[in-house]
Image (tube, grey):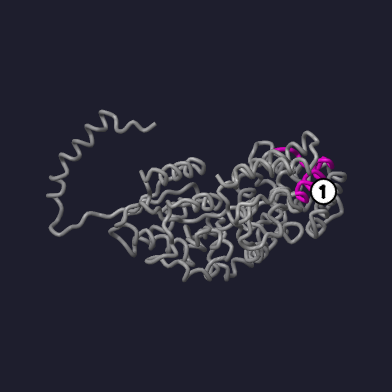
C-alpha cells in the first residue's frame, strides 16, 4: 500500500521547494523549463523506445523522455491501476496485444480515430489484423501497433530426418501433424509438443472470420459448444492418448531442457521464438531447427506490442506524446532497427520491403524464414475481444484438463463450459 512520502522524504521535498525560488532566479533570462514525457513500458519495448531517443532529441532538444520500466506482469498491473484511478498515468503506455483487447472495453484510453490524431489515415500502412485488433466495439481505435508475432511451426530437422520425414509431413492438416508426431515418437522417443493444451489453443482460432469472436459473438452468445471447439478437444485428446506431449508448461525449466536435449520435436509460437531459442533457451541447438507454416493453413498471431495514450494523462503533453508514438510506429527506420536488434517483427508494412527478409537465418540452418512469416502476417485476421475472454479461456482450459486427465466426455465438458459462461456473458 502507498502510504505517501516518509518523514525524511517530506523534509527533502520541503527543502527542495524552499530552494526552488533561488533555482529559478539562477536561470538565464528568457530560459524556459524543460518539458518531459513519461513512457511506461516492459522489457525489450523499453529498449526500443530508448533507441529512438537520439532521433527524438533532434526534433525536440528541449523535451526529455523518461522511460519507466517494469517487468511484464507488473507493468500491466500498474497500468490497470493507473487507468482505474487516473493516478501516476504516463503520457505514453506500451501494451502487449492481449491487454489491448481488455483495456479497450473501458474508457481509459484516448480514441485515436478522433481529431487531432486521426489515426485511420494510416490504417493501410499497417498489417491489417494488427490495426484492427485495436478497434473496439464502439469503433474506437485505442492503440497503435508497433510489432507483431506471426505464428509459426518450429521443427527439429534432425529428429524428423531420423523418422524419415520432412517439414511438409506436419503441415497439410492437424491430423497429419498428430500422425507425424506418432512416427517421430516411435523413431526417436521425442515428444511432438510440450503440452496438448497448445494444440487446443491454436485450433480454436482456426477458420475465424475477421471480427468474429473467439468464445462469444457480438451479442455475447457463447460459442464454445460448437464444432470448432469439439475438433480442438478431439485433437488435443489424440495427442495425449498417443503420449505425444511432454506435459510440461511453456517457459518452465523442463520445457527449456526439452529443447536443449532434443526431447521436444516441435514448438508452435510467434516468429520471435527463434530469437528466444537462439539467445537463451537453447543456443546449442543452432542449425537444427526449421520454420514451417502452422498445420492446416492456420494463421494466428502470438502477441505483439502497441502504444496507447491514457485519456486522463497531462493534456499539455498530448501533442508531443502523439508525435512520439508516430516516431515509434510510422518511421520505417525505427521499425526496422527494432526488428534487427530485438526481433520485433514490424507492424509497419513499409518495413517489410527490404532485402533483410531474404537473408538466411543461421539458427534455422540458413533458411530464409522471414519470407514465410511476412506472408503469414498478411493472412491473420483480427478477432473480436469480449470482456469475459480471460475467464472463458480459464474455463475451457480447465475442461480440457478434465478430458485429458480424468477422461471426461468431450460433449459433457463443452456443455458444462457453455453453461458456466452463459452465467457470466453479460456481466
Up the image or down, 73 lies above or below 382; here it is above
Write down the quadrant of residue 60 in the picture: bottom left
* Quadrant in the picture for the N terminus: top left
Residue at coordinates 52% horizontally, 58% vertically from top-left? 136
Q: Which residues are magenta?
A: 230-248
Name the residue that disc number 1 marks. 181
Q: Is residue 68 left or right of residue 388?
A: left
Our reading of the magenta stretch's main secondary structure is helix
Residue 288 appears in the figure = no
Crowding at dot 1, Cα within 10 Å, few <14 / some 14-19 / many 20+, comes out as: many
Up the image or down, 15 lies above or below 185; here it is above
327 inside magenta stretch = no
Q: Is residue 46 left or right of residue 201?
A: left
Numbered circles on residues, count: 1
**Image coordinates for residue 338, horizontal then vertical, percent:** 51, 58
**Image coordinates for residue 421, horizontal then vertical, percent:** 64, 43
Foreground residue among 61 and 311:
311
* Quadrant in the picture for the C terminus: top right
Residue at coordinates 37% horizontally, 58% vertically from top-left? 321
241 inside magenta stretch = yes
Q: Secondary structure at mark 1?
A: helix
Residue 106 appears in the figure = yes
Residue at coordinates 41% horizontally, 57% vertically from top-left? 110
Q: Is residue 11 left or right of residue 164?
A: left
Q: Is residue 129 left or right of residue 411?
A: left
**Image coordinates for residue 45, horizontal then vertical, percent:** 48, 52
**Image coordinates for residue 329, horizontal then vertical, percent:** 47, 62
Foreground residue among 60 and 421:
421
Amino acid at each position: 500500500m502507498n502510504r505517501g512520502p516518509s518523514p525524511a522524504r517530506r523534509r527533502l521535498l520541503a527543502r527542495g521547494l524552499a530552494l526552488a525560488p533561488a533555482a529559478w532566479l539562477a536561470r538565464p533570462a528568457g530560459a524556459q523549463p524543460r518539458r518531459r514525457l513519461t513512457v511506461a513500458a516492459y522489457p525489450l519495448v523499453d529498449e526500443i523506445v530508448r533507441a529512438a531517443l537520439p532521433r527524438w532529441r533532434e526534433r525536440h532538444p528541449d523535451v526529455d523522455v523518461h522511460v519507466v520500466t517494469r517487468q511484464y506482469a507488473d507493468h500491466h498491473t500498474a497500468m490497470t491501476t493507473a487507468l482505474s484511478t487516473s493516478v501516476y498515468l504516463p503520457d505514453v503506455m506500451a501494451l502487449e496485444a492481449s491487454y489491448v483487447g481488455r483495456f479497450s472495453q473501458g474508457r481509459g484510453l484516448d480514441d485515436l480515430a478522433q481529431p487531432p490524431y486521426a489515426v485511420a489515415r494510416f490504417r493501410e500502412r499497417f498489417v491489417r489484423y494488427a490495426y484492427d485488433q485495436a478497434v473496439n466495439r464502439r469503433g474506437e481505435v485505442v492503440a497503435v501497433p508497433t510489432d507483431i508475432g506471426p505464428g509459426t511451426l518450429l521443427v527439429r530437422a534432425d529428429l524428423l530426418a531420423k523418422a524419415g520425414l520432412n517439414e511438409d509431413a506436419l503441415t497439410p492438416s492437424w491430423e497429419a501433424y498428430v500422425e507425424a508426431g506418432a512416427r517421430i515418437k516411435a523413431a526417436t522417443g521425442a515428444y511432438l509438443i510440450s503440452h496438448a493444451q497448445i494444440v487446443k489453443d491454436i485450433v480454436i482460432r482456426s477458420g475465424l472470420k475477421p471480427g468474429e469472436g473467439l468464445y462469444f459473438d457480438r451479442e455475447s452468445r457463447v460459442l464454445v459448444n460448437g464444432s470448432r471447439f469439439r475438433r480442438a478437444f478431439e485433437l488435443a485428446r489424440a495427442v495425449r492418448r498417443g503420449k505425444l506431449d511432454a506435459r510440461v508448461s511453456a517457459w518452465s525449466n523442463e520445457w527449456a531442457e526439452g529443447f536443449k536435449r532434443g526431447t521436444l520435436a516441435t514448438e508452435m509460437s510467434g516468429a520471435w521464438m527463434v530469437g528466444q531459442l537462439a539467445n537463451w533457451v537453447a543456443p546449442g541447438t543452432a542449425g537444427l531447427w526449421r520454420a514451417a507454416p502452422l498445420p492446416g493453413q492456420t494463421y494466428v498471431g502470438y502477441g505483439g506490442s502497441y502504444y496507447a495514450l491514457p485519456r486522463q494523462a497531462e493534456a499539455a503533453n498530448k501533442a508531443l506524446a502523439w508525435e512520439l508514438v508516430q516516431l515509434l510506429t510510422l518511421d520505417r527506420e525505427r521499425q526496422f532497427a527494432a526488428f534487427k536488434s530485438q526481433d520485433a517483427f514490424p507492424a509497419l508494412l513499409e518495413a517489410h520491403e527490404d532485402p533483410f527478409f531474404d537473408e538466411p537465418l543461421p539458427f534455422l540452418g540458413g533458411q530464409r524464414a522471414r519470407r514465410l512469416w511476412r506472408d503469414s502476417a498478411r493472412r491473420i485476421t483480427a478477432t473480436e475481444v469480449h470482456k469475459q475472454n480471460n475467464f472463458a479461456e480459464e474455463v475451457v482450459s480447465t475442461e480440457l484438463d478434465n478430458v485429458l486427465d480424468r477422461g471426461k466426455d468431450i460433449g459433457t465438458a463443452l456443455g458444462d463450459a457453455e453453461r458456466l459462461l452463459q452465467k457470466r456473458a453479460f456481466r
